[in-house]
Structure formats: C-alpha cells, structure tokens
Image: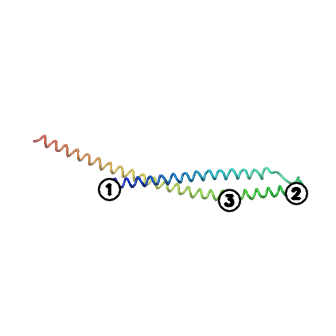
C-alpha cells in the first residue's frame, strides 16, 4: 500500500513539476513581450519628443508635422494601455505560478514524509528479522 502511495505521489510531483515548468516558460515569454512593448513605447515617445517645434515651418508642413506628432502620441498612448493590460495579465500568471510552485512543494514534502515512513517500516522489519535470527541462533546454541 505504501509503495503504491509513493508511486502515485511521485507521479503527482512530476505532474506539478511539469505545470511549474510550463508556467515558468509562459512567464518568460510574457516578460520578453513586456520588454518589447517597453522598447517600442520608448521609440514612439522618442519619435514625437525629438520631432521638435513645428511653428517655424511652412503652414502646410507644420500641419503635417503636427498631425504626425499627434498620430504618434495616440499610438504611444494605445501602446501604453496595451502594456498595462499585459502587465496585469503577467501579474495573474505570476500568481498562478506561485500557487503551482506551492502545490508542488507541499506534495514534495508529503512524498518525503512517505519515504521516511516506508524507510522506518523497512528498518523495523529488518531489526525484527535480525532479532528473530539472533534468538534462533541463541536457542540452537543452548541445545
């Protein structure tokens, strides 16, 4: 019965490890995506900040420059919103990863405890066998 329990617990721990590894991979991908979002946002911000003033240009060029700047600012704002949504999604994924890690650790501790119980039982059986053999040897020596 104990060996069966240990085998089942070992399988559960392996499944939890797989789940943790999958969630860690997912978090790494999401971190990379967040970094790309941030780099793109920095580039967009640099585009409209480094554009400079358009007031001393020809009116048609100034209008085009202002429209471009406005479009880039709107795109950067949309990108910021997407980044915040992605970061919220990352927070949820991090919580799921923490929960999966905790479940794996708990099962690992239960598995270790079961191993110790089985080892203790085996040592007890071995001691009992040695005692019985010693008793038999003693009885044989008395005859």
Closest to the camera, between mark 1 and mark 3, is 1
Determine contact: label 3, label 2, CB under 8 Å: no
Residue that mark 3 sits on: 81
* Residue count near mark 1 (Cα–Cα under 10 Å), binned few <14, some 14–19, many ≥20: few
From the top left corner, tell me how far across and down residue 141 is, in percent: 13, 40
Please name the residue that numbered disc 2 is placed on.
Answer: 60
Residue 127 appears left or right of 103 = left
Residue at horizontal 85 percent and vertical 53 percent from the top: 54
In 3D space, how far apart are the residues under numbered discs 3 and 2 (Cα atoms)? 32 Å
Q: In the image, which is nearer the foreground, mark 3 or mark 2? A: 2
Sequence-wise, which precedes: disc 1 or disc 3? 1
Quarter assignment of residue 94: bottom right
Residue at 68% x, 50% y is 39
Q: Pointer 2 and pointer 1: residues touching (CB < 8 Å)?
A: no
Q: Earlier in the sequence, mark 2 or mark 1?
A: 1
Quadrant in which the N terminus is drawn: bottom left
Disc 3 or 2, which lies upstream in sequence? 2
The label on residue 1 is: 1
Q: What element carries label 2?
A: helix
Residue at disc 3, secondary structure? helix
Judge left or right: residue 47 versus residue 24: right
- Point out the residue furthest to the left here: 143
The picture places residue 87, in percent across and down from the top left corner, at 62, 56
Where is the C terminus found, in terms of image quarters? top left
Point 13% across, 43% down: residue:
139
């Amino acid at each position: 019965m104990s060996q069966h329990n240990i085998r089942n617990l070992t399988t559960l721990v392996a499944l939890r490890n797989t789940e943790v590894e999958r969630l860690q991979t997912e978090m790494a991908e999401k971190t990379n995506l967040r970094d790309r979002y941030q780099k793109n946002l920095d580039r967009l911000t640099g585009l409209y900040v480094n554009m400079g003033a358009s007031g001393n240009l020809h009116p048609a060029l100034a209008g085009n420059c202002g429209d471009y700047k406005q479009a880039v600012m709107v795109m950067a704002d949309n990108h910021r919103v997407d980044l915040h949504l992605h970061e919220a999604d990352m927070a949820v994924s991090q919580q799921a990863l923490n929960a999966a890690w905790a479940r794996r650790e708990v099962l690992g501790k239960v598995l270790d405890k079961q191993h110790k119980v089985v080892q203790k039982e085996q040592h007890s059986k071995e001691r009992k066998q040695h005692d019985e053999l010693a008793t038999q040897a003693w009885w044989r020596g008395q005859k």
